[in-house]
Image (cartoon, rainbow, N blue to C red):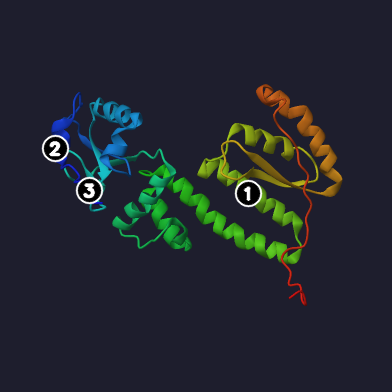
Amino acid sequence: MPRAREPSRSELLESERGEVRSEFGRLSAALVFPNTYSVGMSNLAVHALYRMINGHPEFWCDRVFIWADGAPRALETGRPPADFDVVALSVSYELDELNAVELLRRAGYDLACLADVTDDGLYGRIMADMAQSHGDLCRRLRYIHGAQKRFYRMLEAWKAGDVETIGSVFREDGIGLRDDYEISGPELESMCDIARTVGGVLGERMLGGGDKGASGALVLPGSVDELKRAVEVAYPRSHPDLAGNYAVHVCGIVDGVAVLEGLV
């Protein structure tokens, strides 16, 4: 099926109604939405931020979208984000973060994905260049960079049977998901907060995709009942609306994959 032609910048500008534009500010600001014009302009936050920035006497603002050739350019002036004094990034959908990699490429970084940032020197340069203008994405990069290091620490701890370190890494990763990647939720974090007060809990974190779902904890066998009692007392107080809609499940550790000889 042939792809519909993308309207030109001039056509889009002519079709807009009620726009607020300013060319009198001392500083130029790029409001970047890492997706197409149609997706970006369907987001009310873009409208609110554009109006707010252009309403400030010190600024004039232009909206930046991703165009058919994959390049981020400003709608009104056609300029790239690097030409502006200030760059603000609005991200509402997780898939838009894939476009953040394209922004890094066009800033001179040779990356296929954020997980490619394994070198501490490269990580430091990106954070120095991008943290002020792309703070939310840099926080997620901070989580990904740290998670890759934590994975190998946990792997070595599993090999050594060091359950304390495994629990510590488990907890550290959960805090990163909460604070840097920002995909946890209050219902899950309340469960983690309760678990953290119980002796014998080695680590805890949200599980799955975040928001609502499940939290997990690594617990020494002698502390399982104490953790269950703590949850039964504290969780309904934290979330009365969920008082009858939560459960604690206890799982044990079993041997992993093994080769069974002689079955075939």
The residue carrying mark 3 is 80
Amino acid type of disc 1? Glu
The residue carrying mark 1 is 172
Of 131 and 224, the residue lying toward us: 224
Q: Percent x, y for residue 89?
A: 35, 40
Look at the numbered discs 3 and 2 and tell me whether their residues touch, using CB distance below 8 Å: no
Using the numbered discs, state the Cα–Cα distance from disc 1 to disc 3 in whole angstroms: 38 Å
Among the 4 quarters of the image, the one containing residue 179: top right
Using the numbered discs, state the Cα–Cα distance from disc 3 to disc 2 in whole angstroms: 19 Å
Residue 11: image tag: 2
- Residue neighbourhood size for the residue with mark 1, other residues' Cα within 10 Å, grouped as few (<14), some (14–19), many (≥20): some
State the residue at coordinates (36%, 38%): 90
The C terminus, quarter of image: bottom right
Q: Is residue 171 left or right of residue 92?
A: right
Amino acid type of disc 2? Glu
Work out which residue is located at the far right of the displayed protein and give it: 222
